[in-house]
Image: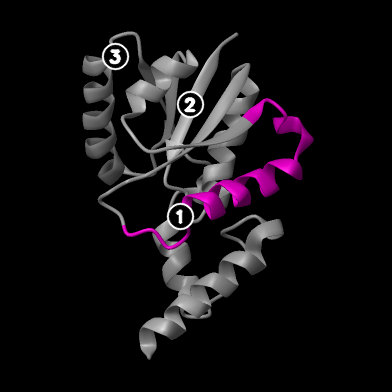
Amino acid sequence: MKTVVCPGSFDPVTNGHMDIIRRASGLFDRVVVLVAANQEKRNHFTPVERKAMIEKVLAQDPSMSNVVVDLFDGLLVDYIAACGASAIVKGLRAVSDFEYEFQMAMTNHKLLPQCETIFFTPSPQNMYLSSSIVRQVGGLGGDISSFVPSCIHDEIRAKLLEEHQNMSR
């Protein structure tokens, strides 16, 4: 059984993230979406909130029954080794993503030689989309309905608006 891990901060999860996860689920037996801590980022949603949002989206799509969501705060390669995954799946939006993701792939491979990284290019409608864009637009009250899954839209919008209002005080 081929297991892959799709790690990310998912802060919040976007349609672009879900596109990569959906495509990976069609190619591998099991996909673990790993909500990982990233000390370099200031998260807007808690890890538990991010995990719950992804699970809510997955519950709406029976074609992704081979996808599970987990939390982890540590070295990705330690998680990979523990769960027996054969690869990491990452999405690459633009050349600007490549340098960082390539460096991480090489580091992970050095730490765990049997670990491969597979890069997926985004679907054309998601090439520009990022969690940062969602947070910026949503926090200012803009329409994020085409950026995030509909079943979690209201939750994301409310949290971003509340956070923006609190920062404005």
Q: Is residue 85 left or right of residue 158?
A: left
State the mark number for residue 5.
2
Q: Magenta segment, which residues? A: 42-67
Q: Is residue 145 visible?
A: no
The kind of residue tagged 2 is Val
The kind of residue tagged 3 is Leu
Q: Which residue is mark 3?
A: 112
Q: Going from the N terminus, do you reach mark 3 or mark 1 first?
A: 1
Q: Is residue 94 left or right of residue 158?
A: left
Secondary structure at badge 3 equals loop
- Circle 1 Cα neighbour tier, 10 Å, few/some/many (<14 / 14–19 / ≥20): many
Q: Are dots 3 and 1 in contact, CB under 8 Å?
A: no
Residue displayed at 53% across by 80% down = 141
Secondary structure at badge 1 equals loop
Residue 57 sits above or below residue 141 on the image: above
- Circle 2 Cα neighbour tier, 10 Å, few/some/many (<14 / 14–19 / ≥20): many
Residue 54 rendering spot, x and y as whole percentages: 61, 46
Residue 59 rendering spot, x and y as whole percentages: 74, 42
Residue displayed at 47% across by 72% down = 137
Q: Which residue is mark 1?
A: 11
**Which quadrant: the N terminus?**
top right
Q: Going from the N terminus, do you reach mark 2 or mark 3 first?
A: 2
